[in-house]
Every structure is written in C-alpha cells, then in structure tokens.
Amino acid sequence: MRLLSCRIENFGGLSGVKVEFRPDFTLIEAPNGSGKTTLAEFIRAMFYGFPRAGKTLEKNRRKKYLPWQGGRYGGSLCFEHGGASYRIERFFGEKPAGDSFALYELESGKRSARYGADIGVELFGLDSDSFERSTYLPQLRPDSDTLTTDAIRSKLSDLVEDTGDVNNFEKAVKALREKRSLFVPYRGSGGLAAKAQSRATLLQERISAISARRPELERRQTELAEMKSALAAKEAERDGVLESMRLASEAAGKASVRASIQRREAELRENAAAEARLLENYPSGLPEARELDALGRCFETAAAMQARLEPSPAYARAKEFAGENARRFASGVPQEAELRRQSENCARIGEIAALLGRPALSEDESARLDALQRRFAVGVPDDALLARCRELERDAQLFGAEGASGKTAKGSAVKGIAVFAAAAALAVAAGLIYRSGHAPLALAFAVLALCAAAAGFALRRREASGETASVGAKAGEAKRELEAALAPYFGENIPENAAGELAVLRGQYLQLKERRDEDAESRRALSDEARELTEQAEAFLARYGAKSGGEGLRAALDALRRDADTYARSVELAAERERELTASEDALRGCEAAVGEFCAKYRIRLELGDGARLREIYGDAALAASLRETILRQESELAELREGDPEPDGAQTADIDALRGEKARLDAEIRSVSAAIAAAEQEVGNIRAELDGLPALTDELELRLSEYREGRKNAEILDLTAEYLERARERLAGAYLGTVKSGFAACLERLGGEAPEDVSLNSDLEVEIDRNGSRRELAYFSTGQADTVTLCLRIALAGALYKDAKPFLILDDPFVNLDDARVQRFLGLLHELSGEYQIIYFTCSESRK
Amino acid sequence: MKIIHCSDLHLDSRLEANLPPEKARERAAELCGSFMRLVSFAEDNGVRVVMIVGDLFDTDRASAATAGLVLSRIRQAKGIDFLYLRGNHDEGAVFRGFELPENLKTFSNTWSTFRYDGVCIAGAEPDASSASGIYDALNLRGNETNIVMLHGQESTQSGEGLVCLPALRGRGINYLALGHLHSYKKERLDMDGEYCYCGCLEGRGFDECGEKGFVLLDADRGGVAARFVPFAYRRLHEFGVDISGLDTVSEIREAMERSAADVPERDMVKFTLRGSYTLGAQKDLRYLSSLFAARYYFIKIKDESRLAMDRSGYQHDISLKGEFIRLVMASELPEEDKERIICLGVGALSGEGIEI
C-alpha cells in the first residue's frame, strides 16, 4: 500500500491543496497552523469518512473540518495497492446523508467497484479508530489511553488465523455475564438463585413452625382421649342413676296399682247399688232399647194421628163448595176441550164484532158514491150507449174538421195506401221468387202486383170523389145525436170528450157500488156467524147453570172454568180427607194397643202420649245399661289389677326427685365434656390439617433448594465459561504479543533508550518499566522517556499488525518532547523503516528534519 | 373365596418422577384414587378379603385427610375384611386418633390369624426383638389353605426387614403374600406353595416402570390360585435413546418417537439420551421437552449423552475457540462441568443464545 498523491478541494483550513507522496519518505515541513494535522485527518477521512458525530467539537470531526472558506467539502486521494492504482473521491455534506464516495482506477479512469465506502476497513482490516492509533503518530501525551482496542486485538489474532470468533469475544462474554446475572447478579441480591433461596428460607420457617405443632397434636390427642374416657365414665354414672330411677318408678307404680284397686272396688259397689235401686221400679225388668224405640215411634205416630184428626178449615170450605155446586155439576164438570172450544168461539165473536164495527167505504168514497148515484139516477149507461156516444163524438169531430179543410178523409187515404202496400209486397215477392229461379211464378206475382197497384189507384179516386160531398151534413147529425144521448147525465153542460168522461164516471160508480154491496153481504154473513156462536155459548153456559150476564160470554166462561176447577179440587180434597181420617183413627187405635201390650209386659203404667213418662223409662233403661257396662268394665279392670298386683316386696322406695336432680347434674356435666371434646376435636382437626400440608411444603422446599443449587451452579458454570474465554483470549493475545514485544525491544535497542529487559508489555499493550526492582506505569516517567517508549510501541505494533502489506505511517511531529539526540536517532530509524513503510513525516522544526 | 393381595401403595408419599407441583398433587390424588378403585373392584367382584401387605402409607408424609378417606372407604365396604399389615414405611401410628372400622383388621409383632371357610390368613409385623424367632412361632393347620402375610426383603437370613424364605419352607404355606418390592414377582416357595410380591399399585417414579397392580387369589380349603391384575391408572416408561451420530433435532426427535411408539398418551415417559454428540449437533432439549410434553401426561428427558471432543482437532486450532477448548480440557474441572463450559463458551462465541 502506497499513497501517491492527494488533492484537497476544501477541508478545514485547507483549500485547493495538492500533495505528492514519495514512495518511501515524505517530509512535509510547515509551521504550526499550516494544516499538517488537517492533512493527516484528510487522509484518514478519505479512507474512512467521518465517524458518527460526538457532542463536543473535538469529537464532531465533520463539524471541526468544515471548510473555513466554504466550497465543496472533501477531495481525492490516489494510492496503489496490490499492483493497481486507484483514486478515492469523497465529499461530505453537513450530515452523513449528504456524503458521496467514488473509486476510480487510475490507469483506465473507470469507476471501480473493487472497494466500497468502507474502503479503510476493507483494506486495513481495522476500524477508523484502530487505523488512526496504528498508523498515525501524533504528538504524544503520556496520559493517553491504551493503544489497544478490540479491533487491534482482533487484528493481532488475525495475524494467526482469521477465525472471526475473536470479534465476538466481547459479545460472548457480555451474554454470559447477562445470563449469569439472571441466576446471581453481580450487584444486589436478586436473581433466580436468591429468589429460590428466599422462598426456601420462608418454607423452612413455615415447616419448622408447623412441625413444632406435632407435640401439641400429641398432647391434644391425649387430652382428647382422656376427655372421652371421662365422658364415658359420666355416661356410665348417668346410666346407674337412670337404673335407680327406673326401680324407684317401678315401686311407685306398684303402690299406685293397689290404690287403684281399692278405688275401683268402691266405685263398683256404688254402681251395683244404683243398679239395684233402679231395677226396683221395674219388676219385670227393664225394657230393651229397641222396645223403647218402637214405643217412641208409636208415640210419635199417635201424636201425628191426633194432629190429623183435628178439624181443617180448608176441608170445611171445600166440602161446603162441593155441596153448593153438586147439582150444577151433577153430570160432571165441563171438559177442557169443550171449554177451550167455547173460548175460541168467544174469541171469534169478538173478532166479528170488530169487523162489523169497521165501515166498508170511507166518507169521501160514500159521498162520491152518493153523487154518482144521483148522476146515474136515470140508469147506468150501458156499453153500447157509450160506444155510440164515442162514435158520434168522433164523427162529429172528423166531419167537422174535414169540412173545414176540404181534404180527403183519412179513412180513404188509408185504404188506398193499403192497396199500394199490397202491390209493393207482391212486387218484392215476385223479385225474390225470380231470384230463386222460378220465373213463371215470379211473373204471376208481378202481374198480381200490377193489378193491385191499379186497384189502389181506382179506389183512391172513387172514395175521394164520394165522401167529400157529404161531410158537412154528417157532422151536424152526429153532434145532435150525441147531445141527446148525454143530456140525462150531464144536462146541458155536456163537456168536451163527454163520452170518455161518462165512461170514467160509470166505472167509478160501478166500482164503489160493487164494494158497498159486497160489504153489506159480508156483514150479513158475519152477523149470522156471530149469532150462531153466541147461541152455542149461551147453551153451553146454560147447561152448567151459568149465564152470560152483563160481563159477557168470556167472563161467564172464565167463571164457569174456575167454578168447575174448584169443584173438582173440593170433591177430591173431601175424599182424601175422609181416607185420612179413617187411616188416622186406625193408627191411633194400633198405638194404643201397643202401649197397652207394653205396660202389661213390664207391669208399669204408661199412657199413650205421656212423653215425660216415656222419657223417664228411656233414662232408666239407659242408666241401667250404662251402669251395667261400667260394672262389667270395672270388674274386668279389677280382675286385671288384681292379677298384676305384686305382693309387697318391702323394698325401700328411693327418692326419685333426688335421683332426677342427680341425673340433671350428670347431664350438664356430660354436655360440658362433650362440648370440650368437640372443641378439642376441632383443634386436633385444625392441627392435622396444618400438618397435612407439610409434605407439599417439604416438596416445594426441596424444589426451591434444588433451584437455588442449580442457580448457583449455573452461575458458577457461566463464570467459569467467561473466565476461560478471558484466559483464552489472554493466551491468544499473549502468544502473539511476542511479535509486538520483539519489534518493541528492537526499536528500543536501536534508539538506545530503555533496556528492553526493563520494559514489560501486557496483553492490553500496557507498558510498565522496571526501576529498582519495582514495575511502574509509563505515567511515572518523564515525557521524553514515555514518548520514546510509546513511539517504539507504535512502530512495533504497526510491524505486527501489517505483516504482509505494510501501510504508510503518518508522523505528526511526534518528537517534540524528545531531545535532539533522541530525535536524530528516531529520524535515522525512520529512514531505515522507509524501506518497509511509506513514511509521511510532518514537522514544523528545522531541528527535527 | 376371592382375596386381593396388594401392597406398597405409599399413599401421600413423595413422587420421585420430578413432576411439577400441580401434576404431583394430581398424581398423589390418583394414587389415593387407585386404592378407592381397588375397593370398588373388590365390591364388584365379590372379594371377601383385601390383604394390604405393608406400606399403605408413607408415615412421615401421611395426612390425616388421606387416613380419614381410607378409613371411610373401608368402613363403607362392610362385607369385606381389610387385613392391614404395616410395612417399613407405615410403621408409625397413621390411624392414631381415628376410630377404626370393624372390618379393618391389624397385626402386631406376633402372629395374628384370621380364618375364612377353610382358609387361614396369618400375618405378623416382626420388629427387631421378634424378627429372629417369628418363624418358629408360626403354627399352621394342615387341613386348611394357609396364606401368610409378611413385609420385607426376601432373604436367606432372618432379621428386621427381611423375610427368610428358607425358614418358611415346609410350613404348610400355600401362598406367601409379601410386600416391599415394587414389582410383581412370583416364585415357588416349596412343594406346597408360592411366594409372591404383588408390587405397588401405581408407579411413582421412573424406577417403577412397567405393569403395576395387585394379585387376585381364588382360595378355598382345596388350595389357592393367584393371578396378577394390572390396575395402575398410568404406567411409567423409560427409554434410552442413543443419539450418537444424530446431528439435527429432527433426527433425535425421530429416534425418541421410535422408542416410545406404542406408549399411550395417558402414561408418563422418561427418555434418557445416551451416546455422544458433537459440538455442532442440535441437541435442543427445551424444544424436545415441549414437543413430547404435549403428547404424554408427563415426560422427562435426562441427558446422559457425552460431548465427543476430538482433542487432536483443537490441538493446532489457532483461534480463540481452540485456545478456549484447550484451556478447559486441560483444567481439573469435573468432566460434566467441562462439557457444559465448552458448550456454553462455543455457543456464546458463535453468537447463539445461551441455553443453560
């Protein structure tokens, strides 16, 4: 790798600057502030661009190197690598998005895709920071941070073999540590192991607490057994008391039996005496209940019969009515059918009377009939007269009119027209016949038609000439005859169209007269019917001694009907009463016989109807039966009592009340002990329930302890893994640190400074110098010594990092703190190194050229 | 007469299968439920006697609730006698404080005998003081079918916790009902009879794989016939899977699937990965666990496979990884730790997630 040239368009304070680099050693001498550091940064920026901006200006290089003068920010750099030459063109915007990058092949001028924007990483295998630390040697500060970065370490490893895994070292360790923190954190007391341990501690405490209750359970169970034993003893004692109570009760029972026997004997005696007293009144014994019941029914019957024999007003009235009407209805009461028929006749008579009461004609009609009778007093015109009058009237009108107008009479004209019509019809018939193919017949009809037409013309001419001459005389004659005919009906005031009016009047008169005649006939028939019906009704009534009287037939018929009914019921009632009286008297006699028989049987006195005496006998009989029953029951009970009556045993009867008191006391004590047992059982149950939970707690404890142990073990394994990775990295680095160390020692030796054996280098490339047997960090030494050591280390590092393709080294006046002798030695060394490296050396001092 | 011979129910015992707490509770309930099912079986099949030959409970962990539940069920089964012989795990007073049902018969350190229509059942709980002389004290009648109950390890010696088989030979025993071993085993005792371990009723850990159940006896004056009745609600299975040469997780999964092809879903399965694997092999135990957990009631994967490290392969590997492996391998750490560290370190360097 060799830098060929660069052209700075605008970069910091530099603008339009072009620099050519020699292949071995390029010295750029310029005063302070001329842009040497800016040039070095430009070269870095061409390969790497700008890193992400920091907050401070120092760290925000994009902002730091903004062109002072403005213009396009960036430039180009030509270099040679692997036998090919390229030109990088890179320009920057204010933000990374505005950056541009292009790579060209110098020979062809064509754009190259050989490297991308990360060309620095691709070429050197280092990031920007590592590149800067390894190829750029600025003025050094003793307190500058370590030279090493992960990328440098990686690069060192890459010297051996490109495995890639070293690059993941930091991530791997970080992941292991994170995982380890899950189990046992590096700080604090969390983590799965601690959580499990904490839970285990709680469980242990809980298990201890519960386990501690085992003795209590034992004690409680013992107490419980004792209490149950005490309870059993109390219950046995109470059983003894109960037995004593039973015996005492038995003794008391025996005494009670004996007292009861004595009491029953006394009662029996009393009842027997009462029975004897009662039987004294009944020498033949007491009647049986059924006999008394029969006697009672006899008494009831007799009373009922007596009541029936009492006189009845209704019966008297009926008898009287029957007597009074016996003759009237000697032949029997009228039959219902007859009565109904007579009633219907009466109704018909009423209807006829109503019909007769209505007039046949209205008043107007009567007046009209009277007037017409007067008009037609001479007689009613007959039809012939009316027809003659109408003919005369027409003639008078016809002749009168023709005479006045001179025209042919209408009748003649009609005759002529009829003849012409016949002719026309014959002509039409002739035509039709001809069309049907009968020419001769058609011809005949045509001749007839012509004849008819000729006759018509002749008739018309004849009539017209004859009638016209006599019209006037005829009209006068007709009028006179008409007036003569109508004068009896109209007098002198014969109206126009009198014939028609006379016909109308005659019609009216005949109609009204006919109606009046018909009505008269009808009335005669109705009157006859009414009379006949009345006669029948009156005959009917008369048969039963009834008359129509002033109230009319209907009232008489109704009265007859009522009388007949009453009579029939009275006769029936009287008969019934007779039968009843007879039966009652018979029953009464039977009752008296029964009572007599009863009295004779039992030799006691009893009158029929003496209810008090009968009730007395009833009472005596019931009392005697009750006494007998009681006596029998008492005798039976006494027999039983006497049978079960133990002999007196002479045992002392215990005080049962005292025993009851003792039992109550024992019951109370048993209840108390039982309650205590229930409470103790509850407590034992509670403790057992708690103890039942122990296995589950123990299981969980073991689980948690296992988790704890596993967590600790996992943490330990993870720690060991991280530790072994660290050690592996150390060893790996240490194994190839020798390259750096040997280069470092050679460099130191050539410079003639510190003895190499006094200087040590660890895997982090941290230098320590041995002084008087103790190792000290570089910061303890002078700036010149420290710079010498650091510069040697940088040169050695570059030698180790870039074994095959040596890069360029940029030295930005790094010897500023060295004395002249050291500067000269370093410069000599640089010239020697320029055979291997392309050296670009910036200085502002003539003395350090 | 039908008799059930069961033992080693270990109710309320700790489950050794490393079940998660929720499943452990569920499984404990299933164990208790199996006893209830056994009683129901006895009721349904006209069993007259249930012999419980020890270790019904784990005394240290037995809860009063479970004891109450067991007693309640026994009390319910009125027509069945429960002959309960305590074992080495339930020698304590589990039932202390409880009223025992009439049909629960217990034993002591001397012989107790129960007779049923020509069948004599004798049992004892020998302790240190009576263990040696207990055999001489056994007195059985020749005209009965004799069943003897003992809890302990079969042995040729007498002593506490041991069942001395030679001492029981020629004693007229037709069936020696033993408890203590958790797997079914039946052997001839002598010319007259057999001795039998019925095994536990349910497996509790993967050291108790296979069929579990009880022995159903059909006994009368003429003799006794016994047959094993598998009765476990779930079975446990353990399969060794050699993952040597299997580089992908799919290959390992397929090998595991092949080994457990016929296992019902309700069972519990343990896979033990064996053989060796290389650093690049995909041995994702988390993925495999989640995959098989969805198939069975419970699964466990134990990794006994070893990392195959070719030391010569890393001898001249001039890299951080090579240096790291060389360093770890040269350390004096336990081999298991070395493997873990190497796997973790190499995984971390390769940027993979850290699975531990």
Image: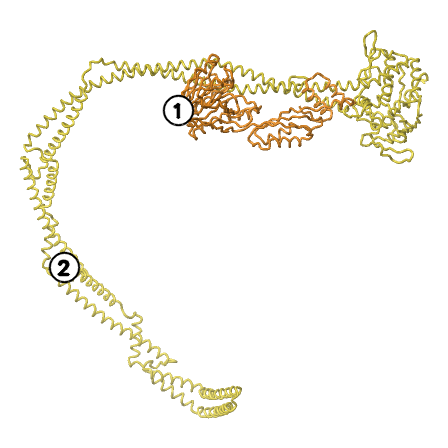
Q: Would you say residue B353 is visible in this rendering?
A: yes
Q: Distance between the residues labelled 2 and 1?
A: 113 Å
Q: x, y (%) of residue A521?
A: 24, 73
Q: Nearer the viewer, mark 2 or mark 1?
A: 1
The part of the image, by quadrant, that contains residue A163 is top right
- Front one among A559 and B79: B79
For disc 1, the marked residue is: B116
The part of the image, by quadrant, that contains residue B145 is top left
Kindly indicate whether the residue at mark 1 contacts the one at mark 2 (C-beta within 8 angstroms): no
Colour scheme: by chain
Q: x, y (%) of residue B76?
A: 41, 26
Q: Residues within 10 Å of mark 1 (few under 14, many from 20)?
A: some
- Tint of chain A: yellow
Q: Which mark is residue B222?
A: none
- Front one among A760 and A668: A760
Q: Would you say residue A686 is visible in this rendering?
A: no
Q: How crowded is mark 2: few (under 14 residues within 10 Å), some or many (20 or more)?
A: some
Residue at point 19% right, 68% down?
A: A531
- Front one among A739 and B279: B279
Residue type at mark 2: give it. Val
Q: Which chain carries label 2?
A: A
For disc 2, the marked residue is: A333
Residue type at mark 1: give it. Tyr
- What secondary structure is found at the residue carrying circle 1? strand
- Tint of chain B: orange
